[in-house]
């Protein structure tokens, strides 16, 4: 079964509140088996446009990735982040080729 991934590009206006979001999202991420592959601001924009932070999170399955996003626990964490950030997020299926 292919894994699922969140790929996010995020601009953060208030790092202190974003830290509270990170604390809150730990609960649903643990519940749904999330593992961070990329988490942080160190990056080089080579083509196109992006945001200041790139985050890639691996889940055991595509369904787990969707379930985590729609969970009440993650939506509560997201409510902390939304007022102080702008994000683009896609959920994608992993390649098993």
Image (cartoon, grey):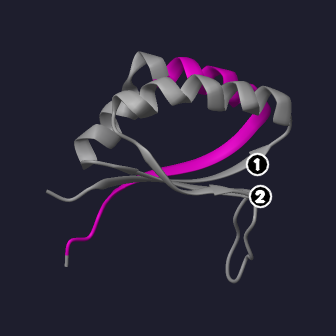
| Quarter occupied by the C terminus | bottom left
Q: Along the line of sight, which residue is nearer the eye, 76 or 35?
A: 35
User: Compared to 3, does 42 lie above or below?
Assistant: below
Q: Secondary structure at mark 1?
A: strand
33 lies left or right of 95: right
Region rendered in magenta: 74-96
Q: Which residue is at 33% across, 38% downward? A: 66
Q: Which residue is at 29% across, 63% downward? A: 94
User: Which residue, given by chain and number where applicable, does mark 1 sit on?
Assistant: 11
User: Compared to 82, does 88 lie above or below?
Assistant: below
In the rendered image, residue 85 lying in the magenta stretch gets the answer: yes
- Residue 72 tag number: none
Residue 5 pos. (x, y %): 39, 54
71 lies left or right of 56: left
Q: Along the line of sight, which residue is nearer the eye, 64 or 23?
A: 23
User: Which residue, given by chain and number where applicable, does mark 2 sit on?
Assistant: 52
Q: Residue furthest left?
A: 1
Q: Secondary structure at mark 2?
A: loop
Q: Which residue is at 28% across, 39% downward? A: 64
Whether the residues at callouts 1 and 2 have beta carbons within 8 Å, the answer is: yes
Give the spatial CA distance, label 1 vs label 2. Answer: 5 Å
**Count of numbered circles on the image:** 2
Residue 43 pos. (x, y %): 73, 70
Residue 40 pos. (x, y %): 69, 55
Q: Which residue is at 65% across, 45% downward? A: 87
User: Compared to 32, does 38 lie above or below?
Assistant: below
User: Compared to 35, does 92 lie above or below?
Assistant: below
Residue 46 pos. (x, y %): 70, 83
Q: Residues within 10 Å of mark 2 (few under 14, many from 20)?
A: some
């Amino acid at each position: 079964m292919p894994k699922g991934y969140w790929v996010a590009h995020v601009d953060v206006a208030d790092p202190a509140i974003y830290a509270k979001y990170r604390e809150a999202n730990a609960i649903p991420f643990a519940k749904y088996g999330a593992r961070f592959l990329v988490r942080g601001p160190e990056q080089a924009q080579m083509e196109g446009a992006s945001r200041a932070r790139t985050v890639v999170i691996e889940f055991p399955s595509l369904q787990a990735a969707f379930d985590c996003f729609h969970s009440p626990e993650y939506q509560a964490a997201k409510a902390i982040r939304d007022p102080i950030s702008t994000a683009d997020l896609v959920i994608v299926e992993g390649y098993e080729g």
